[in-house]
Image (cartoon, rainbow, N blue to C red):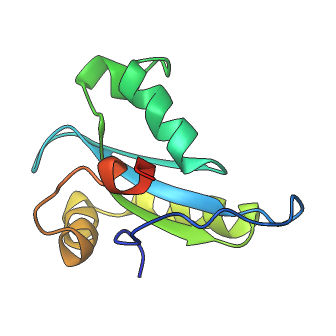
Amino acid sequence: MAGLVPAIPIPENRWMRAFYVYIFASRPGGALYVGVTNDLIRRVGEHKRGVAEGHTKRYGIDKLVYFEQHATAYQAIQREKNIKHWPRAYKTRLIGQTNPEWRDLYVEIASP
């Protein structure tokens, strides 16, 4: 189930890759950011430390509230583009279906 996976599986084979679409929020009902990455923990950490310049840093968008895994970069990028074009209400509903408390999922996926 996307967004509520207790831990991100680490591929055993270096040729196996996973790609992630993620949504960050500043707070429930606040600013949103949709992105894609092949290393979710690293990317979320970059946003939280303010290494990633731009929209997330400017508006304090640092809570991972949703993510989903894809097998290929193409699938993840296509899904990211689709979500980015959705109305805000659709994105909010997607988050609410898997994370109704809008808690920061980074704490759950980054812990050993």
Is 18 on the left or on the right of 63, as rendered?
right
Q: Is residue 53 above or below residue 32?
A: above
> Residue 108: x, y in percent?
33, 56
Is 83 on the left or on the right of 40, as rendered?
left
Residue at 89 percent across and 62 percent down: it is: 15
Residue at 43 percent across and 29 percent down: it is: 47
Residue at 43 percent across and 62 percent down: it is: 67
> Residue 33: x, y in percent?
36, 43
Q: Is residue 14 above or below residue 32?
A: below
> Residue 55: x, y in percent?
37, 26
Camera-side residue: 17 or 79?
17
Quadrant housing the N terminus: bottom left
Q: How many marks are shown on the rendered structure?
A: 0
Can you tell which quarter of the image residue 76 is in? bottom right
Is 85 on the left or on the right of 17, as rendered?
left
Camera-side residue: 88 or 19?
19
Camera-side residue: 102 or 14?
14
Is 40 on the left or on the right of 59, as rendered?
right
